[in-house]
Image (cartoon, helix red, strand yellow):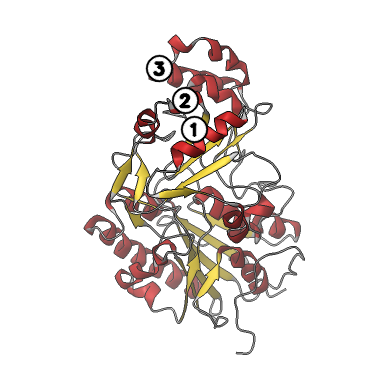
Amino acid sequence: MSLDRPVLSFFFDALKPESLAQMPFLDSLPYKRRMRAELGHSVTCHPSMYSGVHPDKHRHWFVWRYDPDGSPFRWARVFRHLRLLDNVGSRYLLHKFTGLFREPNTAWFSVPLMVNEPLRYWPYFNVVEDRAWDEPGYLRPYLTVFDILRGHDVPFEVVGMTKGGGDEFVQIGRHRFGAIRPWTYFFLGSIDGYSHHYGQDAPETIARLRRLDRLVEEKVAAFRRRVPDFDLIVWSDHGHIPIARRVDIHAHFRRHGHDIHEFINLVEANYARFWFRTDAERATVEHILSDLEPGFILTDEHYRRYHLQMPDNRYGDLVFYLDRPAIFSKSIWGFGRTQKSMHGYLPDYPDSDGVFLSTRPLVAGTHVELVDALPTLLDALGLPLPDYLDGRVLFDKRS
Ligand SMILES: [Zn+2]
């Protein structure tokens, strides 16, 4: 094991390749590739990069899945029959009340409040993640990089991933290197939030990018004072696309003479998912969605191409994808009024790309994939690769 040559890595949520123009230190790293995202949001991308397998294996696609038997809101089934009580206040109370009685959920999203979702549908749904990415067993039965390192007794350090622990300038800025471990992982989460709120090209975000670039440069310099020789790897999970249109799917259903909540549904930023009790429901919803622009119902071909095939209907009997530059205005996350930019669009769009940067030569090609992160890290640490991986080692072994 090459413990004499540690790996220092930085992860940026949502950093676009074009934004490296604002980050002279990161831009000075010699080897760069574009990172192909998964078709989904962070909850899809993180499992892929930490496990080395695509969603059709790790099976994390959305925050919520259909799971009536496992729902934390099972006890609230009584609300199916008490529609008069369903308003924003009672949704907040039910969410709060449920939190008092369930096991703590340490995942990044925990058990979020479903804002524009009728209470009578809450007991159908369960969260996919029950713990943080770096906690043991996060992706069982698949192993994360954190699980694998623990299994090999390889010490590592994760900095910046503590929810509520402050932003990068607090968590990473105040961090001091003690004993150098084989792997040090700095997690930088704020560019995603800045991009949603201002756009990634906005002056506020650009100022932040420049400050973060200096923070990373300082950290790398401090590391180098301790260890002369190490591998530096920097990556992000996806890009960002400015929003130019808001689509009210509730109004669209009303124009067709229906209330969307006649159907079991979950509407998120740019996805609307449906579960059907009858064939007639499916036919009605397919008809209504056929003239909803811009977007389309995902087909088996999409599921194959983007590695999203699932063994059952946990993520929907039907998934409608709303295309760029649009988002849904009324979703389970709220009303999206403050959102200027979004991700989760087709990975084929250049603006969906993240970055991968390295101090070691990389294999040829314009793009790498999120699933390549884990095998590349394991290779840098001299650890064996599991045989089920979808990703590959990105270092060019000829050099
Ligand atoms: Zn985001």
According to the image, label 3 marks what residue? Answer: 87
Q: Which mark is residue 112?
A: 1
Disc 3 marks a residue whose amino acid type is Asn
Q: Position of residue 296 (x, y in %)?
A: 46, 49
Q: Residue 88 carries which label?
A: none
Q: Which amino acid does label 1 sit on?
A: Pro
Q: Mark 2 points at which residue?
A: 261
Asked whether 189 or 198 is in front, the reply is: 198
- For residue 94, side relative to residue 28 (left or right): right
Q: Distance between the residues labelled 1 and 3?
A: 17 Å
Residue 339 visible in image:
no
For disc 2, the neighbor class at 10 Å (few under 14, some 14 to 19, many from 20) is some
Q: What residue type is labelled 2?
A: His
- Can residue 333 be seen here? The reply is yes
Q: What element carries label 1?
A: loop
- Is disc 1 in contact with disc 3, using a CB cutoff of under 8 Å? no
Given residues 153 and 69, the one toward you in this image is 69
Neighbourhood count class around disc 3 (C-alpha, 10 Å): few under 14, some 14–19, many 20 upward: some
Q: In which quarter of the image is residue 290?
A: top left
Secondary structure state at the residue bearing disc 2: helix
Which callout, 2 or 1, points at the residue further toward the start of the chain? Answer: 1
Callout 1: 10 Å neighbours few (<14), some, many (20+)? few
At 60% from the left and 37% from the top, the residue drawn is: 65
Location of residue 263 in the rendering, given as x and y in whole percent from the top left corner:
52, 27
Q: Distance between the residues labelled 3 and 2?
A: 14 Å
In the picture, the quarter occupied by the C terminus is: bottom right
Q: What element carries label 3?
A: loop
Image: 300 above or below 8:
above
